[in-house]
Image (tube, grey):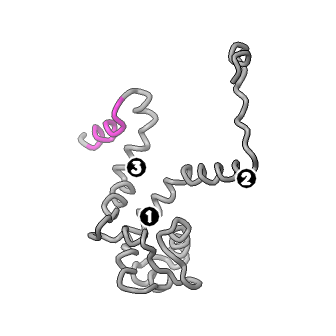
Amino acid sequence: MSENQADAGLAPEPPSHNNENLAELNAELMKLVMGNLVSEVIHVAVQLNLAGLLKDRASATDEELAGLTGARPAALYRLLRVLVSVGLLAEEAPHRFGLTPKGQLLQEGVPGSVYTTALFFGSPRARKIWENLLHRGSAGEYAGSHFESQSSA
């Protein structure tokens, strides 16, 4: 923003981007915006123990995994496709999935595991803390204090 624009109360000029750069920036930002959805999918995958079920198999079909988890095959297939899109699973053949090295870290008890972290951040308690972030942040309070005071009542 130039000094003349600031003095006149004008909005700053948008940054100039070429179309290629804009598409890249947009894709990166969309990943961040949709991060909570990906986190929720990962939480469900951990709750279903998908990484644990796949650890001793080269791969399994969505139907096989649905049978092992009790999930509906169509819904599980959509969840598996999201896990493929973020690099946690590989679709080795149509409807056949295997763990990637990153996906192996969703197993419980392996070095570098994020199993318990994924369980916590998808939990109702963690979600409630983040839901109150705007209110508590603007009030200058710890985001979890509202939730904690409700749960102790």
Which is nearer the eye, 70 or 126? 126
**Disc 2 marks which residue?**
20
Q: Are marks 3 and 1 in contact (CB under 8 Å)?
A: no
Q: Residues within 10 Å of mark 2 (few under 14, many from 20)?
A: few
| Residue drawn at the location 72% of the way across and 20% of the way down | 10
| Residue drawn at the location 26% of the way across and 70% of the way down | 109
**Disc 1 marks which residue?**
42
Q: Residues within 10 Å of mark 3 (few under 14, many from 20)?
A: some
Q: Position of residue 78 (x, y in %)?
A: 55, 71
Sooner in the amino-acid sequence: mark 3 or mark 1: 1
Sooner in the amino-acid sequence: mark 1 or mark 2: 2
Instruction: For marks 1 and 2, give the CA distance.
Output: 31 Å
Question: Residue pushed farthest left?
Answer: 152
- Which stretch appears magenta? 141-151
Q: Amino acid at mark 3?
A: Arg
Q: Secondary structure at mark 1?
A: helix
Instruction: For marks 3 and 1, give the CA distance.
Output: 14 Å
| Residue drawn at the location 63% of the way across and 54% of the way down | 27
Quadrant containing the N terminus is top right
| Residue drawn at the location 57% of the way across and 85% of the way down | 93
Q: Nearer the viewer, mark 1 or mark 2?
A: 2
Q: Amino acid at mark 1?
A: Ile
